[in-house]
Amino acid sequence: MSVNNTTTHPFDDDKLREECGVFGVFGHEDSAALTALGLHALQHRGQEAAGIVTYDGKQFHSHRAPGHVGDIFSSEAVMKRLPGKLAVGHNRYSTTGETAQRNIQPLFAEYESGGFALAHNGNLTNASMLHRDLVKRGCLFQSTTDTEVIIHLIAISDQDSVVQRLIDALKRIVGAYSLVAMTDNQMIGVRDPMGVRPLVLGSLDGAHVLASESCALDIIGADFVRDVAPGEVVVIDREGLTSLKPFGWTPSRLCVFEYIYFARPDSIVDGAGVYEARKRIGAELARESHAPADVVIPVPDSGVPSAMGYANETGLPYELGIIRNHYVGRTFIEPTDNIRHLGVKLKHNASRAVIEGKRVVLVDDSIVRGTTSVKIVEMMRNAGAKEVHMRIASPPTTHSCFYGVDTPEREQLLAARHSVDEMCEFMNADSLAFVSIDGLYRAMNLDSRDNQDPQYCDACFTGEYPVSLTDREDGETAPQLSLLSNLA
């Protein structure tokens, strides 16, 4: 993996980065506007770029640009250039490859059968191998994303219909993904066979809607219909909806980090409310590792529900002892070394009145490199905290993700190199504890993690990767592949 992302926030908050967001509308007069609103609700899943492709009954229209959804699609002139009742949209966050116009999705291709737009959330773990074979066959790649591999596989398929060509292509790929695609008369939603990446189906005024999360349905007033099942291909046309199951049965392995951090708290993912799940994780954390303390404080914003669950379970007061500045952009001054260390203070400030003289339990969702945790603990000490106890609402992150989440290489993960006691000393905390893997599963209303048949993808905690890491196992290192994005 070649990481050279120049768009990373200079005051990095040391979190795992979200994947991408996909959205689609079939059969509504305001499809482009609804898609822009849906992407706005999914902004947390990707902040690098966004795009929408529509079809007006005669031709396809596209607008794609770097930046946030609200900036890209706020112009009336832009929205007028996106007519039609069919629309597909995408929010992008990438870890490798160029930050370039050609990489912004949805990707679009003209096949013999007509136009085809594709939005992809996830990662193909055999993209490099397929890319090499496709180049040998004469395919000319126009982007550096693994999504384009799917475009070329469809092009070379000998199947008759676009849907069958897509299924034929998907049978050759390995990875974790959700897709929303569009032709001139169909919208297609696909979820990978293990369901690692989420996808939901909704309805609005007789129109069909596909989205990464249910919160994107809420913003447009659409009704939640159901989750797209793992391995399901949903085909929507003027006749209605057809469900195909071309991949056979595979145990479901949704990414458990959707509940810990990625999904918005107001979303429902695979039948479970994210907000309540996070509160239950906090309660499990309290039962497993309660610290004698005076107050529970969340690290905003992702630590809030878990901290509430911790406080409810222990009976300790819950206070907003850290105030977050929501208006820090990518940068407003040159991030020199002298300024960069102020990053946490630019985003967070301690409330001394809540903290001074108190034994504090700080609740956060995860620790990646640990750099932010060090500064948050220091912030508590400077605000007069008597003791600082860190509690983390996930098990230690010891392994990198290769399924569409921006994770540092393993040697950069603090928990991969240090014991919990060593991490505690590194952060200068009085104590440090993580929820156990079984505690995490209990919070998801399961007795424990069944080592023979776990219900979620938890590879970042356990190192057990449910989907084959073909490219890494085969040692794909060809120079022309070094720019392939590992994130759609």
Image (cartoon, rainbow, N blue to C red):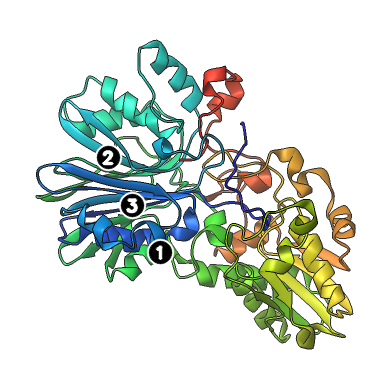
Please, what secondary structure does the residue beneath circle 1 have? helix
Structural distance between the alpha carbons of marks 2 and 1:
21 Å
Structural distance between the alpha carbons of marks 3 and 2:
20 Å
Percent position (x, y) of residue 424?
A: 86, 59
The residue at which mark 1 appears reads as 41
Structural distance between the alpha carbons of marks 1 and 3:
19 Å
Q: Earlier in the sequence, mark 2 or mark 1?
A: 1
Asked whether the viewer can see residue 214, the reply is no
- Name the residue type under label 1: Ala
Residue 117's disc is 2
Q: Earlier in the sequence, mark 3 or mark 2?
A: 2
Q: Earlier in the sequence, mark 1 or mark 3?
A: 1
Please, what secondary structure does the residue beneath circle 3 have? loop
Residue 244's disc is none
- Name the residue type under label 3: Val
Left or right? Give the position of 476 relative to 173.
right
Is the Cβ of the residue at disc 2 closer than 8 Å to that at disc 1? Answer: no
Q: Quadrant of residue 226?
A: bottom left
Looking at the picture, tell me which residue is in the foreground, 107 or 192.
Answer: 107
In the rendered image, the vertical position of residue 315 relative to residue 405, given as above or below: below
Percent position (x, y) of residue 67?
A: 45, 53
The residue at which mark 3 appears reads as 228
Asked whether the viewer can see residue 392, the reply is yes
Q: Quadrant of residue 416?
A: top right
In the rendered image, the vertical position of residue 197 relative to residue 171, given as above or below: below
Q: Residues within 10 Å of mark 1 (few under 14, many from 20)?
A: many
Q: Residue at x 58, y 57 (%)?
A: 330
